[in-house]
Image (tube, coloured by chain):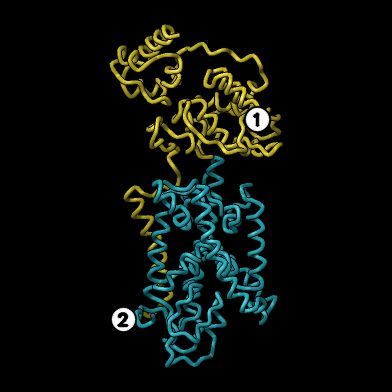
Amino acid sequence: MKNKAAFVAFVMVLSLVAGVGIAKITGYWKTENKKVPMKISQGEFEGESDPDDIRGSYSFADIEAAFGIPPEMTAAAFGMTGDDPGQIKAKNVEETWGEMEGGVEVGTDSVKLFTALWTGLPHDAEETTVLPAAAVEILETYQRIDSAKAAELRLTAVALPNAVGGEAVPAESDQSDDHEIPDRMIRGFTTFGDLKGWGVTEEMWQEKFGESMGSRSTSIKDWAEDTGIPMSEIKAIAQVLVDSGA
Amino acid sequence: MKTERWRRPVQIAFLVLIALIAVNHTLAENGNPLPFVPKASLHAVCPFGSVVTIYKLITEGSFVQKLHESSLVLGIAVLAAAVLLGPAFCGWICPLGTVQEFVAKAGRKILGKRYGKIIPKKLDGILRYLRYAVLIWVIVMTAISGKLIFSDYDPYYALFHFWTGEVAITGFIALGLVLALSLIVERPFCRYACPYGAFLGLTNLFRIMPIRRNASTCISCSKCDMACPMGITVSNQSTIRDTSCISCLICTSDAVCPVPDTVEIKVVPYREMKDEK
């Protein structure tokens, strides 16, 4: 081997090209995650999506897909608006609000906390993590937390200042005190967590549909697609179940 | 110089590629990616990610935030090449190494023969252990936090993200220090602080093709010592097992050594490798 430099150049380029090539052929080459949080592996919530695994790159639409929270709701909770709330990312919350007066922070971990409280799933928030006051309002209004928990969260919750410039500005719902009380109306994004919270049990569901309920974060729209049962039928029957359990 | 005719184009090609990927990632986030350029983040194409995520990968089967399978693939490819050639990734591919070399050219013009001699040899020797402390700190803290804590101090990240607003002030300070120090000593980050260089440098201890000096034909002119960008004394060793070697081949007979076939990268037969010990 006369030209050692050419040999080294060849080996280095080949090792990288071959490594990437083989990984691509075998389907292992991934440069971004699937935006699907990991499942909780043990305990009471085993098999549920883990709010702890929400990344800054997750959009509110990704969070809806995993946890069933409508993007408009998450956007309102964090004072974010835009043409398409589904495209807002958790890290945008951190970029917009981030560290606030008093050393507290409204960021990606706040989105995790909000998601956990909405779904009833566990998440150990960092000590400095707080929720916006609007998020606490939404959680309480939609009966995701009881009044005691809401009062506890209000002790640290922050009122978001008006955003200056940029795409994200405080949502109008932030400014409003007259939230509508939820009417327990069945919609496509209603999750099985909602239904259970409204008194629908596994037995009631199975008796009507002959199928098990989905996970707490599964929306009935997704469940309808999975089972092939018409959405209109599910909505009508589920509404009866909710109304009878109320 | 045969070596530089090959090494420089490879270095520049990877510098341009990484710069394009970094810029394109920003463009892609804004919805205007360049065609034919990967939209991956810089973290996704950094092989060092495979080292820092190793704890999480083993214990949880997942990657540290912002890292992906691509980091592991590149890490394995670079490690495989290093077992054969040593840390040639540092000497031939790493864009931060290339940038430091470019700045060093200016330093040489400014300082002349004093270049590389301002830091006392003894202090230089002690400082070289620092990168192992950095490596251990990065691995432990990443394992504890589950986050890429080094990116806040990483001059490489700062260099290719300075326009994004995501670089911590400590990252800019680190980059500024590295560029400033490159004016007085070659590859300061590689010598004293690079955790990936520290990791790959360990392959020098057992690499299949080390740099070897043929003592019987060596004329002890010390040109190899003066040329080594990592400040290794080549002229008193038969096989270079120094963990700082980056396999740039500048010391070899293809480059500065005036005697043919005297300093070369070549396979060490297993029997001889045992004798080295």
Q: Amino acid at mark 2?
A: Arg
Where is residue A226 drawn, in percent x and y? 33, 24
Q: Going by the image, does A187 lie left or right of A106?
A: left
Q: Is residue A174 above or below residue B43?
A: above
Q: Going by the image, does B74 lie left or right of B27?
A: left
Where is residue B196 drawn, in percent x and y? 50, 62
Q: Colour of chain B?
A: cyan
* Residue located 52% across and 48% down the image: B145
Q: Is residue A73 above or below residue B259?
A: above
Q: Is residue B263 above or below residue B194?
A: below
Label 2 Cα crowd, 10 Å radius (few <14 / some 14-19 / many 20+): few
Q: Amino acid at mark 1?
A: Thr
Q: Colour of chain A?
A: yellow
Name the residue tied to disc 2: B271
Numbered disc total? 2
Where is residue B261 drawn, in percent x and y? 41, 86
Q: Nearer the viewer, residue A145 or B23?
A: A145
Dot 2 falls on a residue whose secondary structure is helix
Q: Is residue A7 visible?
A: no
Residue A156's disc is: 1
Q: Nearer the viewer, residue A1 or B203?
A: B203
* Residue located 56% across and 41% down the image: B30
* Residue located 45% across and 14% down the image: A198
Q: Chain of mark 1?
A: A
How far apart are the alpha carbons under marks 1 and 2? 69 Å
Q: Chain of mark 2?
A: B
Question: Which tag is nearer the camera, tag 1 or tag 2?
Answer: 1
The quadrant holding residue B204 is: bottom left
* Residue located 57% across and 27% down the image: A75
Q: Going by the image, does A193 lie left or right of B173?
A: left
Residue A7's disc is: none
